[in-house]
Amino acid sequence: MSRTLLLSLLILVSGPVAADSDPDPTAALAAIGDLGRLNGQALACRQTASASQAKTLMIRHAPKTRRYGEVFEERTSEAFLAQGRDVAACPSAEVLRGRLDDLSLRLQSLLPVGQPAAR
């Protein structure tokens, strides 16, 4: 078999595998939106440790693009305003921490640290 044919076959076979390793942008953006909602709720409820953890997860996992940043900020603002209307419904720090831990696992599977996402 010629080298050209062998190389062509190798490229064809590896193409779909490489495409499958890219994160799903819809699922990744949804996870970042959920992270923004938790951040907004934590800020409105004065849970600074949870808000700090949410921001750390955003910095660690989200691609540094305008789209991801806008989704995070919009969901943060929406949740902050919604929570501000009903302060009595603030979850405890433990509940927020548990939600952030669950979301951290979800983000790790969708946007592993150091892996760029589709724009």
Image: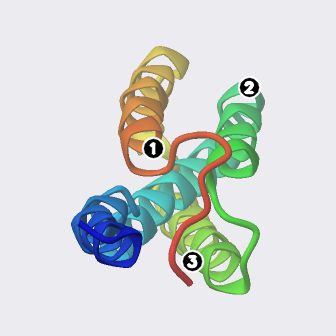
- Assign a secondary structure to mark 3: helix
Q: Residue at x 39, y 61 (%)?
A: 23
Q: Which three-letter amino acid code belongs to the residue tagged 2?
A: Ala
Q: Is residue 90 above or below residue 29?
A: above
**Badge 2 density bin: few <14, some 14–19, many ≥20, Cα 10 Å:** some
- Assign a secondary structure to mark 2: helix
Q: Is residue 70 above or below residue 87?
A: below
Q: Nearer the viewer, residue 67 or 74?
A: 67
Whole-angstrom CA distance, mark 3 to mark 2, is: 21 Å
Whole-angstrom CA distance, mark 3 to mark 1, is: 15 Å
Q: Is residue 37 above or below residue 119?
A: above
Tag shown at residue 99: none
Q: Nearer the viewer, residue 95 or 29?
A: 29
Q: Which residue is mark 2?
A: 49
Whole-angstrom CA distance, mark 2 to mark 1, is: 19 Å
Marks 3 and 1, the one that precedes in the sequence: 3
**Badge 1 density bin: few <14, some 14–19, many ≥20, Cα 10 Å:** many
Q: Quadrant of residue 28?
A: bottom left
Q: Which three-letter amino acid code belongs to the residue tagged 1?
A: Leu
Left or right of 25 in this view: 119:
right
- Assign a secondary structure to mark 1: helix
Q: Position of residue 118 (x, y in %)?
A: 51, 77
Tag shown at residue 107: 1
Q: Position of residue 57 (x, y in %)?
A: 65, 40
Q: Which residue is mark 3?
A: 71
Q: Nearer the viewer, mark 3 or mark 1?
A: 1
Q: Which three-letter amino acid code belongs to the residue tagged 3?
A: Val
